[in-house]
Amino acid sequence: MPTLHQLGRLTRTLDVACARCPRRGRLSLARLIREHGSETMLREATADLNADCPNREAWRIQDRCDVYFPELPRLLGVPEGELAERGHREPGLFGEGRVLEF
């Protein structure tokens, strides 16, 4: 998982979405860096963004808020299809239920 500084060199904003509901948005990397510091990992900086989601603590894991960053694989240079070949599921690979509240 990249640091905010590493992502800030690649883009100014980062798309964020939930795989379980229609919530989507865009995060400002400059704002995240101001609030959390440039060496903070993306996952740490976005851990509580879905705090207001009613599905965050759902009893069934498949019902829980599942936030991911749709453009992150492209930004990090992961070739299309490589995630599936490695057995990773998408979405959720880069968020694991922790984001949203734009």
Image (cartoon, rainbow, N blue to C red):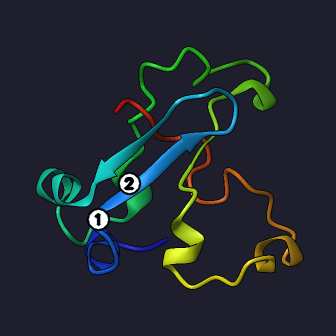
Look at the numbered discs 1 and 2 and tell me whether their residues touch, using CB distance below 8 Å: yes
Residue 59, quarter of picture: top right
Number of dots carrying numbers = 2
Kindly identify the residue that appears in the image at 85 percent across and 70 percent down. Answer: 84
101 horizontally vs 89: left or right: left
Q: Which mark is residue 40?
A: 1
Q: Amino acid at mark 1?
A: Thr
Looking at the rendered image, the quarter that the C terminus falls into is top left
Q: Position of residue 77 (x, y in %)?
A: 56, 85
Kindly identify the residue that appears in the image at 42 percent across and 44 percent down. Answer: 47
**Secondary-structure class at tag 2:** helix
Kindly identify the residue that appears in the image at 44 percent across and 35 percent down. Answer: 100
89 horizontally vs 9: left or right: right
Residue 70, quarter of picture: bottom right
Q: Does 86 appear above or below 31? A: below
Residue 13, quarter of picture: bottom left
**Secondary-structure class at tag 1:** loop
Q: Which mark is residue 44?
A: 2
Kindly identify the residue that appears in the image at 56 percent across and 75 percent down. Answer: 74
Q: Does 8 appear above or below 55? A: below
Q: Position of residue 72 (x, y in %)?
A: 52, 67
